[in-house]
Amino acid sequence: MLTWLRSFYRPAPAAPRLKDEHEVARLYRRWRWSMFLSVTFGYGFYYTCRLPLSVTKKPLLESGALDTAQMGAIGMALLVGYAVGKLLNGFLADHVHLRRFMVTGMAGSALLNLAFGVNSSLPVFVALWAANGYLQAMGAPSSGVAIANWFSDRERGTRYAIWCISHNIGEGITFAGTALLVAALGWRWGFLGPGINGLLVALVLRFTMADRPRAFGLPPIAEHMNDRAPSAHEMSVPVGELQREVLTNPHVWILGLGSALMYVARYAVNNWAMLYLQLEKGYGNIEAGFVVGLFPIVGSLGSLSSGWISDRFFAARRTPATVAAGVLLVAAQLALYFGPPQSPWIDRVAMGAAGFAIGCLLVFLGGLTAMDICSKRAAGAALGVIGGFSYVGAGIQDWVSGTLIKAGQGVDASGKTIYDFTRVKYFWVAASILSTILGASLWGSERRAAAARAAARAAEDAHTAADGHD
């Protein structure tokens, strides 16, 4: 079995190098678009199989199938499984066939959603959602490695920022589309619908994705785009050693911790905002779905504009932009969680502002900065480490949030069950404040690292020029 798995996921062998420049240009043009659209929309649909629990919590609560603490345990199982998968699959993604890895995760997650929709046992729910977390973690590393291999250094920031809207695509479809499905057909179809759709998406990805450029006999992307190629030292070092350098880089650890705390805020919205708006502010299921739907929709604008913001206002530095987005996130949370009651427009504006801030932070803290400071050949490992931290934070959030909401449960004078969200709201805001502080701690080191990279490039260019004169 292990031998078969190694053979199945082994990267496609390098084809003989093409000499026809027109054919090289044609193949790159075709597959760069196909790969980019596949990982962007494909990963977006991953999310539709990750978030069904978020929009079915009130129906599950009202049916007596689960209470908030049990839902928190199931949510934590998914996120811990995802954290483990993000770390392991990040390292594996540098060594596997990208299409097969991505399709496996999508198809497997879809099947687990179908299984969840026809079960009623809490232990089965926990086991299914933990396994779903691991399979979900095949998507982001595959996408990151695909972007690193099919797009050059000078394109990567823009492409990565655009790819980040995949999160928002999936969240928007879930909070709006799946919410309508649940309202019409019941909570089970909140899982069955995404499961059926996920299988169809996996089938499409089977035909629209490929592996690395070398499988077509294409030159490395840096050579094709006349971009800065990796240094001779970087190309001579084994991938395993470059991955170890990722693990020993203190900046990666700081980014990981900051991202973990940012994911507390992000998954507080993804996993609990629907329930919060319904129980604390009196929204209906569909109305709450459309308010929460603003979070990913405006978040996509944050992701798309993040590169332009850092270039236009912060001289291409990521850290000041990260801090600015963190401050906006905290302000939006205060308005959403502690603003005046019965203020739907404040809720909508605050939800949109939080989405915009998170959209920016997903680009900066969530991966691009780590990819900037690590070797392209270890891009999967860099994303895996940051993703592992992020989803440990998200998993702890789900358990803590569910426990705090359960602790705030009471009964009013009429015998109706009520929930006090005060303590959990303080937890959500505090995490964002700490994340912003950690992001700010990289202010000076980012400037020094940029100067060191510029000096190294200048020395390498001078050495190349000297060799040319010889």
Image (cartoon, rainbow, N blue to C red):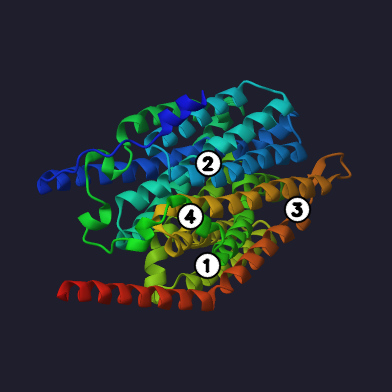
Secondary structure beneath label 3: loop
Secondary structure beneath label 4: helix
Residue 88 found in image quarter? top right
**According to the image, label 4 marks what residue?**
241
* Mark count: 4
Mark nearer the viewer, 1 or 3? 1
Amino acid on which disc 1 is placed = Ala
**According to the image, label 1 marks what residue?**
325
Per the rendering, the mark at residue 137 is 2
Q: CA distance from mark 2 to mark 4?
A: 23 Å
Amino acid on which disc 2 is placed = Ala
**According to the image, label 3 marks what residue?**
421
The one nearer the camera, 212 or 42, is 212
Crowding at dot 1, Cα within 10 Å, few <14 / some 14-19 / many 20+, comes out as: many
Q: CA distance from mark 1 to mark 4?
A: 34 Å
x and y, in percent, of residue 321 in the image: 48, 71
Q: CA distance from mark 1 to mark 2?
A: 26 Å
Q: Residue furthest right?
A: 413
